[in-house]
Image (spheres, rainbow, N blue to C red):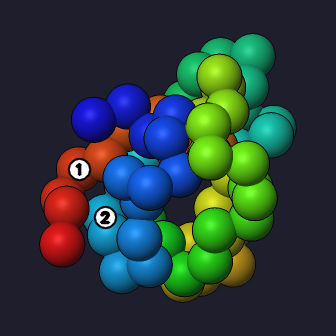
Amino acid sequence: MDGKTRADIKPGMLVNIVLKKDQRTGKLTEGVVKDLLTSAPFHHRGIKVRLDDGQIGRVQEILEAL
């Protein structure tokens, strides 16, 4: 799954996100979702989340669903 639909993402899921500083390169960061920060049901660049370690970025892919 691509992480553009809010309903597909839940806290505790393992995802790859792109951090703001890595948007130009597209470097992905793996982590576990702590909070969903985008309130809209869909976002074309990916739903913004906060990971357990505090990093914030947009979900590019869902690695492990609950």
In this rendered view, identify the residue nearer to me: 6 or 34.
Answer: 6
Q: Are marks 1 and 2 in contact (CB under 8 Å)?
A: yes
Left or right of residue 36: residue 60 = left
Residue 9 seen:
yes
Of labels 1 and 2, earlier in sequence is 2
- In this figure, which residue is indicated by the disc labeled 2? 14
- In this figure, which residue is indicated by the disc labeled 1? 63
- Disc 2 residue type (three-letter): Leu
Quadrant of the rendered image containing residue 24: top right
Looking at the image, which residue is at 38% across and 31% down?
Answer: 2
- Measured in 3D between alpha carbons, the distance from the residue under mark 1 to the one under mark 2, in whole angstroms, is 5 Å
Instruction: Give the percent coordinates (x, y) of residue 5.
Output: 49, 41
Secondary structure, mark 2, is: strand
Q: 10 Å neighbourhood of mark 1: few (<14), some, or many (≥20)? A: some
Instruction: Give the percent coordinates (x, y) of residue 64.
Output: 18, 59
Left or right of residue 58: residue 12 = left
Instruction: Give the percent coordinates (x, y) of residue 22.
Output: 71, 32
Q: 10 Å neighbourhood of mark 2: few (<14), some, or many (≥20)? A: some
In this rendered view, identify the residue nearer to me: 6 or 25.
Answer: 6
Quadrant of the rendered image containing residue 26: top right
- Disc 1 residue type (three-letter): Leu
Looking at the image, which residue is at 52% across and 34% down?
Answer: 4
Left or right of residue 60: residue 58 = right
